[in-house]
Image: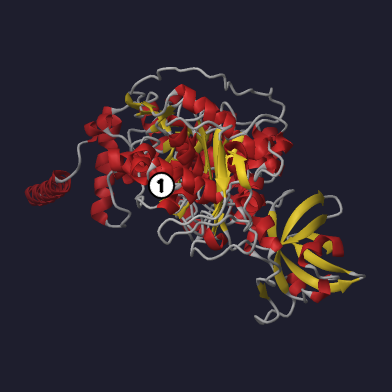
Amino acid sequence: MRSQLRRYLGSLVFVFLLCLAIAVGATAGVLFVYNSDLPQVSSLEDYHPSLITEVYSDDGRVIGSFALERRVVITWEQIPQVVKDAITSVEDQNFYAHWGIDFVGMARAGMKNLMAGRVVEGGSTLTQQLTKNLFLTPERTFRRKIQEVMLAIQIERYYTKQQILTMYCNLVYMGSGQYGFAAAAEYYFGKELKDLNIEEAAMLAAIPRSPPNYSPILHPDKALTRRNYAIDRMVAEKKVTVAHGEEAKLHPIKLVEKQRPNELAPYFVEELRRYLEKKYGTSAVHEGGLKVYSTLNVEMQKAANAAIRAGTREYDKRHGWRGADRNLIDEGVEDVESAELPDWKLPIRTNDIVPGIVLDPAKNGAAAVKIGGYQALLTPQDIAWTKAKVASDILKRGDVALFMIRSMNPAERKVEVSLEQKPNIQAAFGAIQPQTGEVKAMVGGYDFDESKFNRATQAMRQTGSSFKPLVYAAAVDNGLRPDDTIVDAPVSFGGYSPGNYDGKFKGTIPIRQAFAESRNIPAVKTLAKLGVQNLIPYVRRFGITSRIEPVLPIALGAADVTLMEMVSAYSTFPNDGVRVIPQTILRVTDYEGNVLEENLPELRDVIPAETARIMVDLMQEPVRFPGGTSTKAQELKRPVAGKTGTTNDFTDAWFIGYTPSLVAGAWIGFDEKVTLGDKETGGKAALPMWIDFMKEVYKDKPVEQFDTTPKAITALVK
């Protein structure tokens, strides 16, 4: 009996050992197979995540960025303790104790999920989540889970807990295109990571579990519930006191206001992107974390933006009201009082132009308008530019139109507005510092979101009389002086008979007057005497690269040239005949700070200093001469020089002018090269934008004087 029992136990042990051997062998085989194609975690030392390339203004402010993943990389020391506590409390309570896998945590999560009947807590450690972000696909398979566990163990062997948590904070996806906690803190709260409070840290720690579901932007209610759960976890783990936790839960989620889509300098930044991608490649620009130090000045760019928007709207209003954009009732919306417009999700501020819904077009002589949560009354004065006597003449219930917010009363939820419409016209602006060639402002059109075409650098337009300074400069180089006289009378050049804008002839007049009044016949005569064949190579020295036909009408601006070419050409005059090649980038560094590119001023000796100073004197005449084309610029109450330009049929209007330290140019026209309308000259349509810009730039700044003393100077050579 005993021997039988012994034989039975022996057989049982044999079977157990056989099964154990098979299990160990199978496990080893599975591990060998699954481990054979795993990446080496030691390679993390050389791993560089996709980083944001940032563009800075001339005073170090961020004005643009390029990124596939918006990420700001931080170190362990830059992660505040409240963020570390929030992450570990929510995602991995035993993070500092386990070795990559937390069986206790997995069991606890499984039990909670079973009791809740749904997934309320995950069992993966932070290290496992890191492996998913770094190496694995999101597929839910047994093979991937085994690989995740094996990689987590390897990572724990190679790296410290500090390194692992830092990598997690830098790599995890935080929703809305943001990667890492630092980028998310800036995006959601407008703060640096170090400045977060308890509820903000808890909110960020709550997002990675499911960024689409817990986004405080997309699902604020779910986000609040998840945030409060995160705070409770911090209390349970004794990272914050019960009192502090309860107080934090009382605070609402307060997100930073999202700006309206009016980036500071989108056309300028786009110019940089094209250049950078061509030189460094798309990957380096969108993933390499370059630092691009540009020449753009924020305050000048703001002034240029405001000037272009005001100028195009003013032009547009001169040509009448075109009607409301749409009507909600016609679209089938019956309850217009409850209707919402997408633009209202963004903050509404003074001076914003936003859409509103007309509720009652004839309420006590004014129109009742709804704009977001605000109410407005549109008075006859607010629509005066339309020539309508009352709003009901041009608006009806349900109309959606644009309104400028003149003032706001948040307490009463009321705003004062004026009626606007989006201009059909386009405009461009550019400003260059003549001594350095630095481009300080650039506007390429009314709305970058609607058209990326940069009319400052890409549009080839006829320049009109703004080309005349180049003709007169060549003549001055050949002995002409401003006080010389010329006959303004009918003339014919083999079938070509130029005429003046006003159709009149003034006889013998000084060159100063001919230039100030932009007389066409004297300009053509001057070019004829100079010789067309001599002008084209001369103009090339000013940086004009566009095709120019050797015909007399080029004296009147018959050549197609870009705005920035013209502004750069004019920069020669206040700089004593030296043109500095325009530049938009001062320096480019990689993420570690190594300099990849550094640009110093590149000089071109164009004309003698004496010629430049004579031209500066002559080019002040359109402003100071009675009857000059630019006398409106006297509003600036400082010396300025420049020239208007108006083309045949009024298709293009220009003004390019300068002070001793800044050259700027404005252009306005339609993309299709159709007429702007009768009498829409450079002085009427373009000059006011230039003046608005200069007024803002030189506000409270001392008056600069031109040096027009005759003086021959040899300019610096390239």
Residue, x 47% and y 50% (percent of image)? 557
User: Where in the figure is residue 139, as x and y percent of width and height?
Assistant: 30, 57
Residue, x 7% and y 49% (percent of image)? 7
Residue, x 77% and y 65% (percent of image)? 370
Q: Nearer the viewer, residue 526 or 381?
A: 526
| 484 vs 26: above or below | above
| 695 vs 589: above or below | below
Q: Is residue 233 visible?
A: no
| 570 vs 306: above or below | above
Q: Is residue 483 left or right of residue 408?
A: left
Q: Nearer the viewer, residue 603 or 107?
A: 603
Count how many numbered circles sit on residues in the image.
1
Amino acid type for the residue under numbered disc 1: Gly
User: Where in the figure is residue 525, as x and y percent of width and height?
Assistant: 48, 46
Q: Nearer the viewer, residue 296 or 146?
A: 296
Q: Quadrant of the C terminus?
A: top left
User: Where in the figure is residue 277, as x and y percent of width and height?
Assistant: 32, 43
Q: Is residue 240 left or right of residue 572?
A: right
Give the secondary structure at mark 1.
Answer: loop
Q: Nearer the viewer, residue 547 or 713?
A: 713
Q: For the residue carrying disc 1, how many other residues have a C-alpha within 10 Å: few (<14), some (14-19), or many (20+)?
A: some
| Residue that numbered label 1 is attached to | 123
